[in-house]
Amino acid sequence: MSRGYAVLSARIRAEIEDLDRVGLRVARAIEVARKAGEEQDVYLDSIALNLHDVYSGYERVFKLVAEALDDEVPEGSGWHRSLLATRLPDVMAACRADLERFLAFLDALDGR
């Protein structure tokens, strides 16, 4: 493996480890929110913020791959969707439909 791909692989692994930690925070917040009663909104805010962090983490991974494969990252107002359309290995492409649905959900929340 060339040094460039070794660095890319290490950066992707680090992002995935971060995503795992965020996923655990989401799971903990969901558990607490179920028991929180009237204070539930505080935990729901935490869940929403962490879900946004999950999408952002996947975007960072897609950016790393786009830079490595295409030597560029999409720009402009539609860069989120363009990034998902970037040439990606099959492993990344398998996630694309889920991430597009997730992006649509985040767009609806943000009023985009």
Image: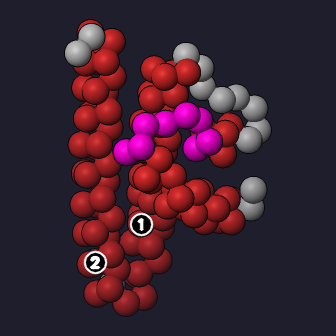
In this view, which residue lies farthest toward the bottom? 37
From the viewer's side, name the closer residue of 81 and 90.
90
Residue 55 at what x, y percent from top left?
A: 48, 51
Image quarter hosting the C terminus: bottom right
Work out whether 39 lies above or below 92. below
Picture quadrant where residue 84 is located: top right
Q: Which residue is mark 2?
A: 32
Q: How is the image coloured?
A: secondary structure
- Dot 2 falls on a residue whose secondary structure is helix
> Residue visible at 51% across and 52% down?
96
70 lies above or below 80: above
In the image, is 104 to the left or to the right of 91?
A: right
Gap in angstroms between the C-alphas marked 2 and 1: 11 Å
Q: Which mark is residue 47?
A: 1
* Quarter of the figure with the N terminus: top left
Q: Secondary structure at mark 1?
A: helix
Q: Is residue 22 visible?
A: yes
Q: Which span of residues is magenta-colored?
A: 84-91
Is residue 71 covered in magenta? no
Image position of 87 with respect to 106: above or below = above
Task: Give residue 105's position: percent from left, percent from top.
Answer: 60, 65
Q: Residues within 10 Å of mark 2 (few under 14, many from 20)?
A: some
Residue located 26% across and 52% down the image: 20
